[in-house]
Structures are given as structure tokens and as C-alpha cells.
């Protein structure tokens, strides 16, 4: 049974593995507790794992989701120095911030803990003692940077300098890792190192430490990786990062540090040292499970019955595929080893990178303060999940996905269905329609051709959805679920249910009962992605907040007969719109508000407040009326034009183009030109338009027939080799023009529908004036983006069924 209400901090009954059931242990990388998480952190770890955890519960698997804050190490000590408090005070403060952010994002942890606990010390020291007993540890003297000014050895993160990696030269690389190239480092490798506290140059000094002998464990580790990377279908970026480490050759790794804040080393000689965070942090998964249940070993020492899935950003891969497995293998105990790893690349922000340390981007608490609903944030981040390459957060893209995909596709479908069912047919006019909120009976639905075809399509989509989600292809799973909404819109449109109500009521009842079933199915499939959306849909359906999608109950089989999902006679609740349009002025406001770093924003806020005070004082001293009591009006300057029309040429905006969804009804080669096609295209008018296109050498004739296309309908007609072309088919081409592809609307887009661009309204010109160069001016900003979406600048070509795309040309020019 899917849990659609749980969030971070909610306590649920403890679950233990069940013999004969599928037991899944899910973790997401423990976020550092030294800052507020930004959107890149959220999609990279906790949100992705939450979607999979919710999916597993929906499917009836016995799954738990474990996470918490990583609290030990240099990062915490550094932050404590910055804020002039103790490490524990920093941890308490930021643990609460993280917990609250994740609770707002509806992250459904079974346990959200922390690593600064007695359980962490107990488990960490026990693992260490096993490694010591099994002779996988060695003692060595190493050279470490020592700051005479601060009178202490400098931990990795207290040292900065230039990265030694050839070709990188980043001048603010940390002592443990270069943020720019991702290379793991030792502090002594840095060029021109400096103390982060006092900025003086440290000196090298000897200190004794303990090391994990990774080279001695390499053969066992390779056996694990070669087996599990295949069995668990590791993501390609995880395999690549792991192989890069193995290819470079494993070296012994230091597991202790000269710090005070951490798990103490339980040896007399090393009593003033603590475990290094890379060794101690992954053990946090185990200790937090220990906080969840004292029977934690049933999850963590049960490889025959438990599958471990781990989620993280790409910079965390080696710690989870090399370091942590080596540690567990070295104990000689039967641990539950990671089966599947899901890794994300970076989510970038507008023109640069999200950065916690520099305060750049939108942070978890910022998202809440925008008043944009949490389901919109979750949807946008998940559609933009950087699964195979870095992706980009932009406010315009968020607006486009909200307005076109959530509002015009998903929200529009659900509201049309439920509003029609809710209508009172006896509204007094005698021409009413609707079912007074009661689901009608629908005998014969299985033999209704349009409905039967929909059931088959949905059944196929659901099979694809399950396959994608089982393989942790979350972005693909979401896309498939949204395709079902698109099919629902097309079904409504093709059925013309509003006419059927008057002309064929039994068929209308079939369409509406089926559509209500599809609404319920969407609430189910989208629950892992947008749980608050599903709760609201179930409320409007007047159904319990309990969802199931398990094989045992036959839930998947039922999807092929959506007309049977919600029973006849059931009374629905009150339909209300599910999403609200995000307007241009709001987007501009947010773009400006979150520009620069958090420090820049704070400075702007201070300046704006000061400016506001000045304006207030100025207004107090401004004369607002003359002696007669009439308000003064500004006078026109001598050179000002008498009318606006004389002063302002009509603005050149994308709304002046009349781009429509069309379908090619006929196509043949031009009788007098080998490179041209002549098409008859239906653009929603009484007669098809004749269009001449130079596409012969790019697209075969048979692939042109019956294709949906985007058609520019208000160009001045032009005669091409004796045939007048009344419009233009829009295509994308590569920079060298060797490849050309049609810009295609969604399959369910209505013929004749105008293609729009979020934020641009207004009627198009009847005919574009060639002398004014309107088309030429706008065309330079038409292109396909890296997600193959057709765009004007960064705004997608949008229809009520979704955005228009090309097949394979990214960053192509559209004309």
C-alpha cells in the first residue's frame, strides 16, 4: 500500500525484512550538515531516492529509506569557526534546517538520523576492530601540513591551493578534492597551499596515522564490482568513475585524522585522533539504521534477503563503489552489499553552478518561500534530473514545464473530466449536461473501439513505466506517466464527449467512466513523483488516500480496463484547478531575486531597504496638489510626439507569428524541381494549404505522409517554380545544413491549434510584411535545445498537449 502522506520526521512502524517478500534497503548520500541544501543536492540524493522508495511501497515491496546528516569532520569544524560556535551547535542548527527542508519537499524517510550518535561510535569502532584483527590496516608516518600560526595540523578542508592536476590549475582546490575537476587529493599535493583560517603558508610535518590497505583488498573488490555492476545494472556514470579509479591503481588510504570532532580511534597510541570522514560517513547508513531498529543487522547483514539501492551525486561514487565496499569486505562478515547505484550528474543554475560554499542558486528554504507548490518543484527537478549529463535549471524552463505540461496537459485533463462529471444536468436551462457528481455505469465499454484502443495503449505505457522504474530510470518513468495524460486528452478530444452527451449518452458514459479511471491511474503512477498532487486528486475523486500498484493484487492488469477502476454510483468530490499559471512578471522577479550569491542578495536587500527609505522621505516632501486642490500633472516636453502611434513602431514579438499544428494529407515531388516537395497540409481551415518545401534530400517521401508538423501560416505567399506556397513547414537543421528534421508537435495536439510561447499573448499578424523583416528578426532566436525541444530563445513551442520537439538535432537552427 503506497504511503502518500509520510514526510521527513514522521515516525512509522518499524519494518524488518520478511522472508519470501522483496526487501529493499534504500539510502541517499548523507548531506553535510554545514549548510542549507540547494536544489542540486536535493535532486542528486534525497529526492531521487524518495521517488524510488515511494515506488517500491506502491508496488507492495518491503522497503525502508534511510538517510541523515553527515556531522563529523573538517567541514563542520570549519563552519563552527566561521559562526563562532561549537561543532555540536552547528550540527544541531543545520540538522534541524535539513530536516525541515526535506519535510517540506515531502521526503518520506523511514529514518532521518545523524552521525554524531553513540550508535555511530559503536558501529564504526566495531568495523575498525575487525579490519585490525584481519590485518587490513597498517601504520605509517605521513607528512601533513601544520600551521604554526594556529598551532595545529591542518585537516584537508582547512587547506586551499592550486590543483596539481595537469590542465586544471583551479586556484581554490581543497586539500581533499578539487571542486572543479573532481580529482581526490592529498593536502601536500596542492601548489602554493594556504591555511583557510589565517591564510598563512603551512609547513610540512610528520605525523603517524592508520591506513586501509586497499591494494591487498583489490582482488576481492574487483570480484564484487564485476558481479554486482551487472546484476544491479549500475548506471554508466558510476561504472565509468569506478573503472577510472581501478585503472589508476588502488593505493592505501589514510583512515585517521588529527581532529577533535569525530569518532575517536579506540587505540591508546591514537587516542587523540578521529576517523577520517570518508571512512566514518558511509558507516552512518548502518548506525542510522541502528537508531531505527536495534535489529539493524537483519537489514545490513542479510545479503540473501535484502537488496541495497544507493543514490548519490557523481562526486560520491568512489566512496560507495570502492572505499565502503572494501571496508565491509575487509571485516570478513556477511554484509548486505550495494546492489544498485543510481548516480546523477550536476544540476547547474542559470549561467553557472549551484554552490553551497558560494551561496549560488536556489536553496531548499528559498523554494518554500517562492509559494510555488512543492509538487511543481518536485516535478521540475525530476523532469530535469541529470541522469547522463549535466542539466540546467532556468526560471523560464520551470515556467514552461509548469504552464504547458502540468497546467495545460495534466491539470487540464483531470479538470475537464471531473468538472463534466460534477455538472448538474438539471441546471434549469433544459440544455444541461453532466452526471451530478455520480460516476455513470458503462456497459459495453470493452467493445467501444476508441475506449478499447485507449486501454491497450495505457496497458503498454504501464508496462514501460514499470520497466523504467525497476531500472531506476526515474526521468523516463515520469515521462511515460505524463504520456498517459496526453493520451487522455486525445481520447477526450477524439470522442467529442460534449456532443456524445446529446447524441449518444451511453457512449458518453463510457468515455467519462473510463476517463475517471485514467485520472485515478495518474494519481497512482505520479504519486512517487508528486505525492501532494496525488492526495489532492484522491480528495477530488472522494477516494481514500491509499494507493496500490502491486502484482499480487492484480493492479497492473486492471490498467488495461480503466473503465473498471472506479465503480459506477461512486460520488466524486468537488473539482478545483490543480495548478496555477506562472506569469512572466513572476519569473522575472524570481530571476532577479535569486541572481548572484546569497551574500550578493543580502547586500541588495540592504540597499533596497535604504533606497525605499529615501523614496519615502522624498514623497513626504513632495507637493502633490496646487492651491486649487487639483493634482498636478506632468507636462509634455516640446519634442514629445502627440500620439503613441507616431512614436512607437509595432513591437516585434514572437506572438506576431501564426504557427499552427498541421498534418500533411498529401505529398508529392514538385514536377519541375528535384529538391522540392509539394504538400497539402490541413491547418484547421476549410481547405488544406499548398506548401512547397525543400526537403527531398533530407526526408524520404513515405516519411512525410500523415506527419504532424508545425506550420508558419502568415508568411506572404510565394511562387516556387510555378506553384504558389501558402505557408512554411518549420524544420531544424545542423550548423552545416547536412541534416534537417521536422519540428513535430505532440501526437495528441489538435489540428489547427496555435503554437504558443509562455508569456507571449496577442493575435498574430494577418500577413507578415516582408519589408518589416519580422520573420527574419525572430528566426535567429528559433532553435532546438539539448533536450531536443523546439524553442524561441529559452521558451518552448507549446501546445495544449505538450511541447514540440525534433528527433535528434540538438542546438539546431529552426527555419
Image (cartoon, grey):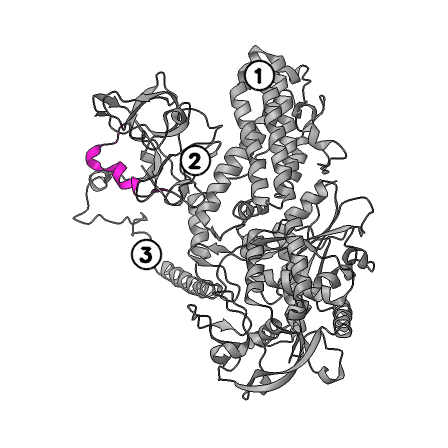
The residue labelled by disc 1 is: 432
Q: Quadrant of residue 293?
A: bottom right
Mark 3 or 2, which is nearer the eye? 2
**Residue at horizontal 60 percent and vertical 18 percent from the top:** 427
The residue labelled by disc 3 is: 623
The residue labelled by disc 2 is: 804
Does any portion of residue 430 appear in the rendered image? no
What kind of element bears circle 3? loop
Going by the image, does 555 lie left or right of 490? right
Q: How many marks?
A: 3
Mark 2 or 1, which is nearer the eye? 2
What kind of element bears circle 1? loop
- Place of residue 486 in the rendered image (x, y in percent of width and height, measured from the top left): 53, 31
Going by the image, does 166 lie left or right of 550? left
Going by the image, does 139 lie left or right of 649? right
Residue 772 lies within the magenta run: yes
In primary-sequence order, the first of circles 1 and 3 is 1
- Place of residue 208 in the rendered image (x, y in percent of width and height, measured from the top left): 65, 84
Amino acid at each position: 500500500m503506497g504511503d502518500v502522506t509520510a514526510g521527513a520526521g514522521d515516525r512509522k512502524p518499524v519494518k524488518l525484512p520478511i522472508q519470501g517478500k522483496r526487501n529493499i534497503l534504500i539510502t541517499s548520500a548523507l548531506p553535510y550538515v554545514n549548510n542549507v541544501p540547494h536544489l542540486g543536492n536535493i535532486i542528486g540524493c534525497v529526492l531521487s531516492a524518495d521517488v524510488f522508495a515511494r515506488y517500491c511501497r506502491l508496488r507492495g515491496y518491503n522497503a525502508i529509506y534511510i538517510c541523515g546528516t553527515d556531522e563529523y569532520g573538517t567541514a563542520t569544524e570549519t563552519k563552527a569557526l566561521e559562526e563562532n560556535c561549537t561543532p555540536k551547535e552547528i550540527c544541531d542548527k543545520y540538522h534541524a534546517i535539513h530536516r525541515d527542508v526535506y519535510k517540506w519537499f515531502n521526503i518520506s524517510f523511514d529514518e532521518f538520523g545523524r552521525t554524531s550518535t553513540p550508535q555511530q561510535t559503536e558501529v564504526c569502532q566495531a568495523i575498525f576492530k575487525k579490519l585490525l584483527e584481519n590485518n587490513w590496516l597498517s601504520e605509517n608516518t605521513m607528512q601533513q601540513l601544520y600551521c604554526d600560526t594556529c598551532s595545529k595540523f591542518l585537516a584537508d578542508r582547512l587547506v586551499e591551493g592550486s590543483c596539481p592536476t595537469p590542465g586544471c590549475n583551479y586556484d581554490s582546490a581543497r586539500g581533499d578534492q578539487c571542486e572543479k575537476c573532481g580529482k581526490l587529493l592529498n593536502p601536500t599535493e596542492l601548489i602554493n597551499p594556504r591555511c583557510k583560517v589565517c591564510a598563512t603558508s603551512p609547513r610540512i610535518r610528520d605525523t603517524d596515522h592508520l591506513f586501509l590497505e586497499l591494494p591487498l583488498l583489490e582482488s576481492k573488490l574487483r570480484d564484487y564490482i564485476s558481479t554486482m555492476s551487472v546484476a544491479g545494472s549500475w548506471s554508466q556514470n558510476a561504472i565509468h568513475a569506478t573503472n577510472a579509479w581501478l585503472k589508476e591503481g588502488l593505493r592505501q588510504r589514510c583512515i585517521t585524522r588529527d581532529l577533535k570532532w569525530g569518532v575517536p580511534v579506540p587505540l591508546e597510541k591514537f587516542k587523540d585522533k578521529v576517523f577520517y570522514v570518508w571512512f566514518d560517513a558511509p558507516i552512518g547508513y548502518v548506525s542510522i539504521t541502528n537508531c531505527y531498529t536495534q535489529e539493524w543487522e537483519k537489514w545490513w547483514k542479510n545479503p540473501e534477503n535484502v537488496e541495497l539501492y544507493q543514490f548519490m551525486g557523481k562526486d560520491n561514487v568512489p566512496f560507495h563503489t570502492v572505499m565502503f565496499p572494501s571496508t565491509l569486505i575487509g571485516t570478513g562478515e556477511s554484509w548486505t552489499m550495494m546492489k544498485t547505484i543510481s548516480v546523477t550528474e550536476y544540476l547547474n543554475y542559470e549561467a553557472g553552478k549551484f554552490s553551497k560554499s558560494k551561496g549560488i542558486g536556489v536553496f531548499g528554504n528559498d523554494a518554500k518561500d517562492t509559494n510555488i507548490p512543492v509538487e511543481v518543484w518536485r516535478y521540475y527537478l525530476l523532469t530535469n534530473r541529470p541522469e547522463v549529463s549535466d542539466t540546467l535549471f532556468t526560471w523560464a524552463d520551470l515556467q514552461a514545464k509548469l504552464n504547458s505540461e502540468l497546467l495545460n496537459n495534466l491539470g487540464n485533463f483531470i479538470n475537464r473530466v471531473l468538472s463534466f462529471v460534477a455538472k448538474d444536468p438539471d441546471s434549469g436551462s433544459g440544455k444541461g449536461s453532466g452526471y451530478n457528481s455520480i460516476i455513470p455505469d458503462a456497459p459495453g465499454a470493452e467493445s467501444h473501439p476508441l475506449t478499447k484502443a485507449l486501454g491497450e495503449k495505457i496497458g503498454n505505457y504501464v508496462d514501460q513505466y514499470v520497466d523504467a522504474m525497476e531500472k531506476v530510470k526515474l526521468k523516463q518513468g515520469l515521462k511515460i506517466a505524463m504520456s498517459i495524460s496526453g493520451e487522455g486528452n486525445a481520447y477526450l478530444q477524439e470522442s467529442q464527449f460534449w456532443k456524445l452527451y446529446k447524441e449518444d449518452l451511453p457512449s458518453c458514459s463510457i468515455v467519462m467512466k473510463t476517463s475517471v479511471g485514467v485520472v485515478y491511474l495518474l494519481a497512482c503512477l505520479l504519486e512517487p513523483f508528486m505525492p501532494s498532487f496525488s492526495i489532492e486528486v484522491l480528495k477530488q475523486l472522494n477516494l481514500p488516500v491509499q494507493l496500490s500498484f502491486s502484482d499480487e493484487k492484480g493492479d497492473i492488469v486492471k490498467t488495461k480496463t480503466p473503465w473498471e477502476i472506479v465503480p459506477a454510483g461512486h460520488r466524486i468530490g468537488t473539482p478545483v484547478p490543480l495548478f496555477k499559471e506562472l506569469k512572466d512578471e513572476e519569473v522575472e522577479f524570481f530571476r532577479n531575486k535569486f541572481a548572484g550569491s546569497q551574500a550578493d542578495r543580502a547586500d541588495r536587500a540592504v540597499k533596497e531597504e535604504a533606497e525605499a527609505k529615501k523614496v519615502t522621505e522624498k514623497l513626504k516632501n513632495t507637493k502633490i496638489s496646487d492651491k486649487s486642490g487639483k493634482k498636478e500633472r506632468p507636462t509634455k516636453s516640446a519634442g514629445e510626439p502627440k500620439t503613441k502611434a507616431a512614436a512607437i513602431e509595432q513591437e516585434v514579438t514572437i506572438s506576431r507569428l501564426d504557427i499552427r499544428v498541421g498534418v500533411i494529407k498529401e505529398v508529392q515531388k514538385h514536377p519541375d524541381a528535384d529538391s522540392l516537395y509539394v504538400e497539402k497540409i490541413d491547418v484547421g481551415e476549410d481547405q488544406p494549404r499548398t506548401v512547397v518545401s525543400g526537403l527531398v534530400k533530407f526526408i524520404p517521401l513515405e516519411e512525410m505522409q500523415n506527419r504532424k508538423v508545425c506550420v508558419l501560416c502568415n508568411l506572404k505567399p510565394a511562387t516556387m517554380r510555378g506553384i504558389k506556397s501558402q505557408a512554411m513547414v518549420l524544420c531544424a537543421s545542423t550548423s552545416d545544413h547536412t541534416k534537417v528534421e521536422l519540428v513535430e508537435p505532440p501526437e495528441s495536439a489538435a489540428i489547427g491549434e496555435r503554437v504558443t510561447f509562455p508569456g507571449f499573448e496577442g493575435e498574430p499578424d494577418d500577413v507578415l510584411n516582408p519589408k518589416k523583416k519580422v520573420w527574419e528578426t525572430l528566426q535567429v532566436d528559433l532553435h532546438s535545445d539539448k533536450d531536443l525541444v523546439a524553442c524561441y530563445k529559452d521558451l518552448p513551442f507549446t501546445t495544449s498537449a505538450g511541447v514540440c520537439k525534433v528527433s535528434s538535432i540538438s542546438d539546431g537552427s529552426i527555419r
